[in-house]
Amino acid sequence: MLRSRHRVSSFQADLVALLPRLRRLARALTGSPAAADDLVQDACERALRNQSAFEPGTRFDAWMFRVLRNLWLDSHRRRAARGGVHETIDVAETISGADGAEIVALRLTVRDVERGMLRLPEEQREALALTCIEEFTFAEAAALLGIPPGTVMSRAARGRMALARMLRPAPGGDES
């Protein structure tokens, strides 16, 4: 009984420690802080209900990201079937250690990158979120997505190139 209670408390502690990363991935997938929070909450509820499915000794973060991603895919498919679209992103977080002009410039850049991420095909957005934001290796992201590492590399590369094109200033535009 004591070992089981320790496993539960360790599971819960690991889950709490992972919350910022889960929210970051959820935000990259959903494009909305509110939708990301809902997705993380649903993923945590599902994980807690099904914690016996987690195999100790394996990567907890990868297991949780898979739970979150599966929930997002289910929701995304339902929304797409109903003709739904992604919400726009509200970048309201403050950035410490910067002056007003820097904060405005950083917020505009973050907004542009987030909007660009939402314009990417789902596969590229997932690959970039896992490898660039969550810093999974290509092999780890591939295992999480159930695809070959080369496919993750290709999707991430295409996503980075597409984002770079979207963020490039327009020819003849004012760059002052």
Image (spheres, rainbow, N blue to C red):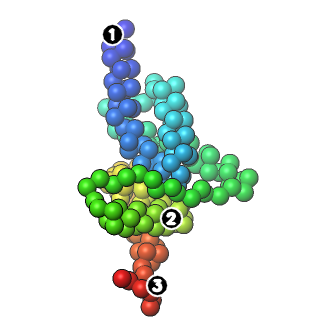
Of tags 1 and 2, the one toward the viewer is 2
| Mark drawn on residue 70 | none
Which of 148 and 7 lies nearest the eye of the viewer?
A: 7
Identify the residue shown where x is 42% and y is 79%: 168
- Is residue 115 visible in this depiction of the protein? yes
Q: Amino acid at mark 2?
A: Arg
Q: Amino acid at mark 3?
A: Ala
The image quarter containing residue 108 is: bottom left
Identify the residue shown where x is 34% and y is 34%: 17
Image coordinates of residue 93 in percent, x first then y, are 41, 51
Q: Residue furthest top?
A: 1
Above or below, 121 relative to 51: below
Return the residue at label 3: 170
Image coordinates of residue 37 in percent, x first then y, are 51, 41
Return the residue at label 1: 2
**Which sits earlier in the primary sequence, circle 2 or circle 3?**
2
The image quarter containing residue 155 is: bottom left
Helix, strand or loop at disc 2?
Answer: helix
Return the residue at label 2: 115
Between marks 3 and 1, how big is the CA–CA gap? 63 Å
